[in-house]
Structures are given as C-alpha cells and as structure tokens.
Image (tube, rainbow, N blue to C red):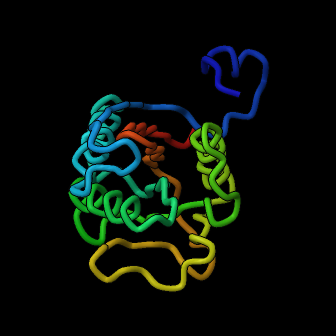
Amino acid sequence: MLEERSRAIARGAHIYAELAGAASTADAHHITAPSPDGSGAARCMELAMADARLSPSDVTHVNSHGTSTPPGDAAEAEAIYKVFGSPGPAVTSIKGVIGHTLAAAGAIEAVAVALTFAHRLIPPTTGTTEVDPTFQLDVVMGGPREWEPGPVVSNSFGFGGHNGSLLLIPA
C-alpha cells in the first residue's frame, strides 16, 4: 500500500520502504524500441535521483526493467553505465521469476525492492548465466546477495521510449 508516512505510523503499519523520488521521460525514438544510446532512460534515473536529492554514489542497487530483449537490455545497460559508471551499484531484474506483467510490472518491482530491504538480500537475475561483456555492470547472478539496504532505483521502461524510475529508500 502506498500512503502518507504519517498515516502509516498513526495506524501502526510496518513500513518497508519510502518513495523518495520519481521521474518520467519519453524519448519517442521508435514505436517499440528504446533509444539505443539509453539517453532517455539515463535522464529518467537522473531526474528521480534529483527529486530524491541523491547522487549516483548514494544508490546501492538498480532494479532494472530487464526484459531480456537485446535492444532493451543494451539500451538499459548503456543508461545505467552512463549514470553510475562501472561497475556501479548491484543490478538485478525480477522478470526471470515473474515474467513481464506489462502495466503491473512497475508496482510488482517496487514491492520486490521493498522486500529486499526487509530481507537484506538482493535477488539474483534468474535465468541469467552470463552477461554481454560490453555491459560493464555488476549484475547479480547465481544466488541472492547480502547487502546493507540503501537507496534503490527501480526502472520501468516501455514501448515508444516511455521511461519511469522510482527512487526507493529503506524505511
């Protein structure tokens, strides 16, 4: 449930995560393909961090959109690299477990991020055994990774170059 912090506290709710920032951009590159250079996705992540008043060095994990399409993954990898450098924060995608739930993907992924805070584990990118060596990212594979929860960028990128990024922090 997404609600005002004061209301959650008043009703005694357990707070898993807080939404610290959000952004949306549209690069309108192609009807289905993202801009290959990742510029729109990179700008979206930068705006979400600015909204949260955080810098790239504050982010500890990126929950990638990660649809396993060659153009989508290459563009997102390029965007993450542009924003965070190499190796940057830990990167994972949960779509290998849940599939692509289309319009529900962003909400489900935000819940997954909240659970990473609660369990202090970043889930692996299920089904991934190797990463294109040009990606230069710290992709979590093989098993979950223990971590000290910190700010997470959660990406949702869609057809037509629509980009959405949330910046979630532990409660």
On the rendered image, what quadrant is the N terminus found in? Answer: top right
What residue sits 59% from the left and 49% below the top?
A: 113
Q: Position of residue 137 (x, y in %)?
A: 34, 71
Q: Quadrant of the C terminus?
A: top right
As drawn, which residue projects farthest toward the front?
Answer: 31
In the image, residue 61 sits, relative to residue 141, either above or below, namely above
Frontmost residue, 66 versus 8: 66
Residue 24 image point, x, y percent: 37, 31
**Viewer-nearest residue: 22 or 4:** 22
Query: Percent x, y for residue 49?
Result: 32, 38
The answer to whether 7 is drawn above or below residue 168 in the figure is: above
Between 97 and 12, the residue placed more toward the observer is 97
> Is 32 drawn above or below residue 70 in the view shown?
above
Q: How many marks can you see?
A: 0
Residue 100 pos. (x, y %)? 63, 53
Residue under the image location 39 percent in, 37 percent down: 162
Residue at the location (31% across, 46% down)?
41
Quadrant of the rendered image containing residue 79: bottom left
Q: Residue at x 30, y 32 (%)?
A: 53
Q: Is 144 drawn above or below residue 120 in the view shown?
A: below
